[in-house]
Image (spheres, grey):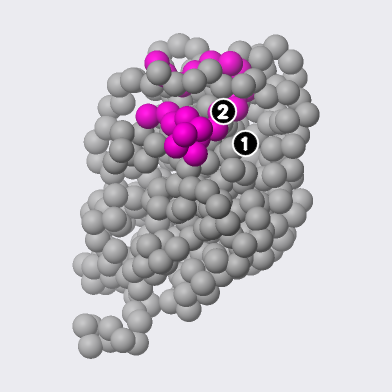
């Protein structure tokens, strides 16, 4: 049987296959007013298509735990109950197609309050519904970006509570998996890396101190997330800096701690915390980071990064480099990637009754 189409069980949850959808922001919610951050018809159609296409797990895009935690004013949020109610339409449909619904809980930190990518992605001010970004240290992400307000210890603890509140709401909205976003230079990743964290208190300096906030968030979320359901963490395995950055060695060390704190799977990406770095991309270029975490810690991992072909994904899994693959841009190009891969590899997959004539 194809490795890609074997079910995968974490805690009491069984995901029907190992072709999963990576979180990808759509920047398509309303920016302000009573409908701010709420999923709409675009989001429903976007995720529903990939579920009908056979994707085993769909991780909903980075969803902000607070208004200040959004990357852009058009990001999704889960900081109020109105947002929860709107999510139920999506989670119900995904489950009806046999797809596991997951959500990525996020705070953008110093990279918050930027425009939509197709409008350039530059920082936006109050006149465009923007706000003052927050961060571990008063260090801007890049030239032209504002200096973030350095978080106090009390504010750090408040944000930790917001992650827990968001997890409670995610459960109420029907999600079976919560993923904590610690990658791509957003708030948790900013605390982890010495490139962006220059604090001299208990949240900065040593590896243990820089990891403190992330582990406190994990503990707060795990405390409210049911023991029978899995908790994921997304990490950038490296900042791609030659010095003074987060490294692959740090990721392995941190992964072992995450395992001790109740994380069930590490979603291994890379980069995003340092502007204008050179990243050596290519097919599967981030897979070795995931493979190393799995080999050295035993923590289950999902691999991501230019995984586009069925045979490529099958090889990653059959070689034991990862427990699942997360597809991003390829699923944007082809919502039915999983069905096509199943036909190519001889795997079994759920097909909507309406599409049975296509078999």
The residue nearer to you, when weighing 81 against 170, is: 81
Q: How many marks?
A: 2
Q: Determine which residue is flagged by label 1.
A: 256
| Left or right position of 200 against 129 | right
Q: Above or below — where is 9 with respect to 305?
A: below
The residue nearer to you, when weighing 54 against 139, is: 139
Residue 334, x across and y down, in percent: 24, 61
Residue 159 appears in which quarter of the rendering? top right
Residue 19, x across and y down, in percent: 38, 60
Image point 21% across, 83% down: which residue?
358
Q: Above or below — where is 218 with respect to 228?
A: above
Q: Main secondary structure of the magenta part?
A: loop
Can residue 20 be seen here?
yes
Image point 51% across, 32% down: which residue?
126
User: Whole-Å distance between the Cαs marked 2 and 1?
Assistant: 35 Å
Image point 38% across, 21% down: which residue?
275
Circle 1 residues within 10 Å: few <14, some 14–19, many ≥20 = some
Q: Determine which residue is flagged by label 2.
A: 132
Can residue 297 be seen here?
no
The residue segment tinted magenta is 122-143
Asked whether residue 12 is drawn in magenta, I would say no
User: Which image quadrant: the N terminus?
Assistant: bottom left
User: Which image quadrant: the C terminus?
Assistant: bottom left
2 and 1 marks in contact (CB < 8 Å): no
Circle 2 residues within 10 Å: few <14, some 14–19, many ≥20 = some
Q: Nearer the viewer, mark 2 or mark 1?
A: 2
Compare marks 2 and 1 and give the one earlier in the sequence: 2
Q: Above or below — where is 338 with respect to 74?
A: below
The residue nearer to you, when weighing 29 against 224, is: 29
Asked whether residue 127 is drawn in magenta, I would say yes
Image point 62% across, 21% down: which residue?
149
- Mark 2 falls on what kind of element? loop
């Amino acid at each position: 049987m194809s490795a890609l189409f074997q079910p995968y069980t974490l805690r009491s949850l069984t995901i029907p296959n190992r072709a999963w959808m990576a979180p990808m922001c759509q920047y398509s919610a309303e920016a302000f007013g009573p409908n701010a951050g709420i999923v709409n018809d675009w989001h429903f159609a976007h995720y529903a298509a990939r579920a009908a296409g056979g994707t085993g797990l769909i991780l909903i895009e980075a969803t902000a735990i607070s208004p200040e935690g959004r990357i852009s004013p058009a990001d999704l949020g889960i900081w109020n109950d109105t947002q929860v109610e709107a999510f139920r339409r999506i989670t119900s449909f995904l489950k009806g197609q046999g797809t596991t619904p997951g959500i990525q809980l996020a705070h953008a930190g110093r990279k918050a309050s930027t425009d939509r990518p197709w409008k350039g992605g530059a920082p936006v001010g109050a006149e465009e519904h923007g706000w003052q970004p927050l961060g571990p240290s008063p260090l801007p992400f890049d030239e032209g970006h504002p200096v973030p307000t350095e978080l106090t210890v009390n504010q750090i603890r408040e944000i930790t509570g917001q992650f827990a509140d968001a997890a409670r709401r995610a459960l109420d909205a029907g999600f079976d998996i919560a993923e904590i976003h610690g990658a791509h230079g957003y708030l948790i990743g900013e605390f982890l890396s010495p490139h962006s964290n220059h604090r001299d208190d208990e949240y900065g300096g040593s590896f243990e101190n820089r990891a403190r906030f992330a582990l406190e968030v994990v503990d707060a979320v795990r405390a409210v997330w049911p023991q029978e359901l899995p908790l994921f963490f997304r990490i950038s395995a490296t900042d791609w800096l030659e010095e003074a950055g987060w490294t692959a060695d740090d990721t392995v060390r941190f992964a072992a701690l995450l395992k001790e704190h109740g994380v069930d799977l590490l979603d291994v990406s890379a980069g995003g915390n340092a502007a204008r770095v050179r990243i050596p991309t290519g097919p599967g270029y981030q897979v070795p980071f995931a493979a190393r975490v799995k080999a050295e810690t035993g923590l289950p991992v999902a691999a991501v990064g230019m995984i586009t072909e069925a045979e490529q994904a099958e090889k990653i899994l059959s070689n034991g480099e990862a427990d699942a693959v997360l597809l991003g841009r390829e699923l944007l190009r082809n919502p039915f990637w999983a069905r096509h891969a199943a036909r190519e590899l001889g795997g079994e997959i759920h097909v909507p009754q309406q599409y049975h004539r296509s078999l």
